[in-house]
Amino acid sequence: MTQDPHQARIDAILRSPSYRLAYLDTDFIRRPDLRPLRLELELLKPEIMLEEQGVHSTIVVFGGTQVLEKQEAERKVAAAREHLDKNPDDPQARRELFRAENVLDNSHYYDDCRNFARIVSSYRNAAGENEYYIVTGGGPGIMEAANRGAHEVGAPSVGLNITLPFEQVPNEYITPSLCFQFNYFSLRKMHFMFRAKALVCFPGGYGTLDELFTTLTLRQTQRMQVIPIILYGTEYWTRIIDFQVLADEGVIKDEHLDLFNYVDSPEEAWELIANFHKH
């Protein structure tokens, strides 16, 4: 049966992208010239939802995705050793075993972070409420350890995930209603800092360094609230970055070395935070 031409024209109008409600038209919202709108939405959505759920004070935990729990690190060492045994003349196989052994040596940071998050998440204010919410980037490694520690003591925690060219699934220990996905690193960093009462930076790579130096720069220039900035793992951080050289070369002031502290135990990290906030 031939379709009524009038109805056919109406159907064509209804199917046209121009007829979609603007806020439901994802193709339209993704246009390059609508980036300011996307930035505003990415600022507002977590802000509103965190406020609605009473998240006012946070302890931010940064750290690498490749810092693994000991059992997982041991499996990687075993696999790398087996691969080298089968390919004894392969320099890449030897390199991978070397790297896997270092990951195993660093696996204690996973446990330390998990314990630190338990301590933070167990603290209650005078009203018996969670004083601090653990906030991470929502991924694996150190981030998983921190969310896991909070989860194990029955406390909610936040994950600020980011879209990447490769798949990154949020770790399973984040409170579902407090897990957010970001497209823009800049907005994600802002949300890390908005409610932060302390920052604890565990060993990590480029992403961790980026987040650390963003925070140090904001503190150096007095563009954010005064908070403890804690570098967890003195041996790791003093090998990775020689901050003293920056002061010696005159590119930072000597007092800028006081913007952070080194610690080597969960209890020491918590003591710094507790003393700073006079608990």
Image (tube, rainbow, N blue to C red):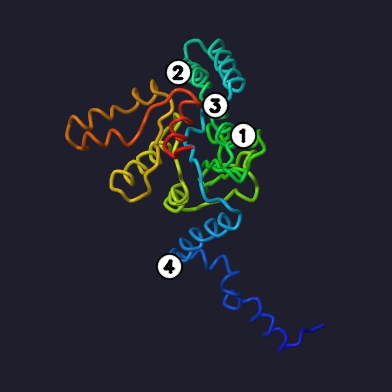
The kind of secondary structure element at disc 2 is helix
In this picture, is 147 found above or below 74? below
Mark 4 or 3: the one toward you = 3
Q: Mark 2: few, some, or many residues within 10 Å (few <14, many ≥20)? A: few
Ranked by sequence position, the earlier of labels 4 and 1 is 4
How far apart marks 4 and 3 lie (CA) works out to 42 Å
Q: Nearer the viewer, mark 1 or mark 2?
A: 1
Label 1, secondary structure: give it.
helix
> Mark 2 near mark 3, Cβ–Cβ under 8 Å?
no
In whole angstroms, how far apart are the C-alphas of marks 1 and 2? 31 Å
Give coordinates of residue 102: x percent, y percent.
Answer: 47, 18
For image coordinates 47% across by 37% down, the residue present is 62
Q: Tag 4, which secondary structure? A: helix
Q: Which residue does the numbered mark 3 point to in the structure image?
A: 110
Cα–Cα gap, marks 3 and 1:
10 Å
Amino acid type, residue under disc 3 in the picture: Tyr
Amino acid identity at mark 1: Arg
The residue where tag 2 is placed is 95
Distance Cα–Cα, label 4 vs label 2: 46 Å
Residue on which disc 1 sits:
148
Badge nearest the viewer, 4 or 2 = 4
Q: Residue 249: horizontal and vertical position, in percent? A: 17, 32
- Mark earlier in primary sequence (4, 3): 4
